[in-house]
Image (cartoon, rainbow, N blue to C red):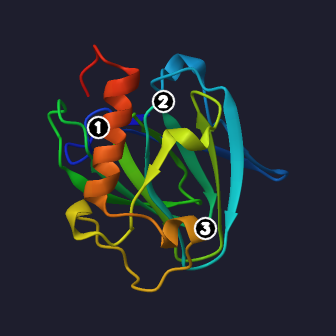
Amino acid sequence: MLETRRDLPDGVELRALTPHADSRGVFLEMFRQEWGVGGDLIQWNAVHSAPNVLRGVHVHANHVDYLIPIAGTLLLGLHDMRTQSPTGGRSVMLEIEGGSPQAVSIPIGVCHGFYFPVPSVHVYAVSSYWDGSDEFGCRYDDPDLGLNWPTSAPVLSDKDRKACSFAEMRQAFQEHWRTHNPNKPL
């Protein structure tokens, strides 16, 4: 069931998923094309994260993200950096438990980061093949994001540790967008 929440950035969709359990285990339907998640999903990935790992914050110019935590806990930070969006500048944190699975669709132009307080697994799909030139990142703790993470010393990748400011990421993203989509507002 698609959940409508007024606090989410425009175009972000949160869908409750229904696990079907019996004596053999659990069946979970994670995706149906008819749900229309904002793009045709063409690549699926699974990610295992250790406790206190933070991935991101990043944004994509060419693909929609569709993610589902299936074990553990995901704290998802979102910030709408689209200038034409009715929710531009909005930030929100979502907590999703693998035991109560939900799918989240994240449109182009909404930056996002993932924090895992406990060992966790999530699967995600994208609407175009992963391409590092499509990923723009910034420091997770940049105050302009308006995201209050529950840690001041997360485990980060080298790339995320060396990331630039939110203002620098936004400028690089907007320049990339204008170059590749000259007649399409963001």
Question: Badge 2 local density, few (<14 within 10 Å), some, or many (20+)?
Answer: some
Question: Badge 3 local density, few (<14 within 10 Å), some, or many (20+)?
Answer: many
Q: Is residue 17 visible?
A: no
Task: Answer above or below: position of 81 versus 58.
Answer: above
Q: Secondary structure at mark 2?
A: loop
Give the foreground label among 3 and 2: 2
Q: Is residue 117 visible?
A: yes
Mark 3 — residue?
72
Query: Which of 84 and 78 lies nearest the eye of the viewer?
Result: 84
Q: CA distance from mark 3 to mark 2?
A: 29 Å
Q: Position of residue 56 (x, y in %)?
A: 48, 60
Question: Residue flagged by tag 2: what amino acid is it?
Answer: Asn
Task: Answer above or below: position of 97 versus 128.
Answer: below
Taking the spot 65% from the left edge, 31% from the top edge, the residue there is 129
Q: Residue furthest bottom?
A: 153
Mark 1 — residue?
4
Quadrant placement of the N terminus: top left
Query: Which of 179 and 19 lies nearest the eye of the viewer?
Result: 179
Mark 2 — residue?
62
Task: Answer above or below: position of 172 versus 156.
Answer: above
Question: Residue flagged by tag 3: what amino acid is it?
Answer: Gly
Question: Badge 1 local density, few (<14 within 10 Å), some, or many (20+)?
Answer: few
Compare marks 3 and 2 and give the one earlier in the sequence: 2
Q: Secondary structure at mark 3?
A: loop
Give the foreground label among 2 and 1: 2
